């Protein structure tokens, strides 16, 4: 799979220094600056330490089954067009080289919602989906809120997450402005994701 991150740092120089510091014990395969500059830091065939503890589908050791891409962003602002274009170009190659389906392009917040929120509220997941580089559920009639958990877990979210954290992680990506308890819309979107891109397609392959 591919895991997308933001650096949560003020500039790419600081992010690069941290990613290259052995003492920090953190690394990523790529770093993309705001101007679209792409830095390759770890060969794709090697493991990088970018994901940490978490889970997606059946994969618990995400670092060993993923390519990590860091986007220079403090977490408080949008992602510039040049940066998004560079990300899309990079993803096209990565997905093709490793036969990674678009549903396996996820955010750090998807696989580790108890710890992480990146790539964050302002990341344009719809743009990636329109380019065939991630997924977005189509319009559907409302579902039963009681079925939300089953749909979200069926898509890939950790079944051990408490209800509130599962809902928050799902909404951060798919309904970032929604509030309150699970709604019919949440359930419908989760059901569509589980039906079109079910968890049984997320086995232990890159």
Image: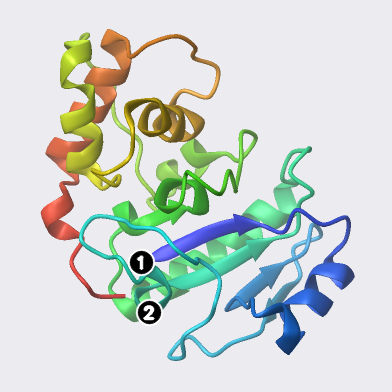
The answer to whether residue 91 is left or right of residue 77 is left
Q: Secondary structure at mark 2?
A: helix
The image quadrant where one finds the N terminus is bottom left
Residue 128 higher or lower than 92, as above or below = above
Task: Give the camera-side residue of 124 and 10.
Answer: 10
Above or below — where is 205 with respect to 144? below
Give above or below for 52 relative to 134: below
How far apart are labels 2 and 1 at the CA level?
10 Å
Q: Is residue 192 visible?
A: no
* Viewer-closest of 128 and 30: 30
The residue drawn where x is 46% and y is 90% is 46
Q: Position of residue 18 (x, y in %)?
A: 78, 75
Residue 152 visible, this orientation: yes
Q: Residue at x 31, y 56 (%)?
A: 56
Q: Position of residue 148 (x, y in %)?
A: 23, 23
Which numbered circle lies on residue 64? 2
What residue is shown at x 44% (from left), y 35% (from top)?
169
Q: Name the quadrant containing residue 201.
A: bottom left
Mark drawn on residue 98:
none
Q: Is residue 201 above or below residue 49?
A: above
Whether residue 81 sits left or right of residue 69 in the image: it is right
Residue 1: image tag: 1
How many marks the image carries: the answer is 2
State which quadrant residue 120 falls in: top right
Residue 198 x/y as whole percent:
15, 46
Q: Nearer the viewer, residue 104 or 167?
A: 167
Q: Position of residue 38 (x, y in %)?
A: 70, 73
Q: Nearer the viewer, mark 2 or mark 1?
A: 2
What kind of element bears circle 1?
loop
Q: Is residue 72 left or right of residue 173?
A: right
């Amino acid at each position: 799979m591919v895991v997308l991150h933001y650096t949560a740092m003020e500039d790419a120089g600081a992010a690069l220094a941290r990613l290259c510091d052995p003492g920090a014990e953190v690394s990523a395969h790529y770093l993309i600056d705001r101007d679209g500059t792409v830095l390759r830091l770890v060969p794709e065939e090697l493991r990088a330490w970018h994901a940490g503890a978490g889970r997606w589908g059946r994969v618990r050791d995400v670092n060993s089954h993923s390519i990590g891409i860091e986007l220079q962003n403090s977490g408080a602002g949008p992602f510039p067009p040049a940066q998004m274009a560079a990300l899309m170009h990079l993803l096209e190659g990565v997905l093709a080289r490793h036969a990674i389906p678009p549903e396996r392009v996820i955010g750090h917040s998807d696989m580790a919602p108890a710890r992480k929120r990146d790539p964050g509220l302002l990341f344009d997941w719809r743009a990636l989906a329109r380019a065939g580089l991630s997924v977005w559920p189509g319009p559907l009639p409302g579902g039963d809120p009681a079925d939300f958990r089953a749909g979200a877990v069926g898509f890939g979210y950790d079944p051990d997450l408490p209800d509130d954290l599962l809902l928050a992680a799902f909404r951060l990506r798919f309904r970032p402005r929604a509030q309150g308890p699970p709604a019919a819309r949440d359930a419908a979107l989760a059901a569509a994701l589980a039906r079109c891109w079910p968890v049984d397609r997320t086995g232990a392959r890159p």
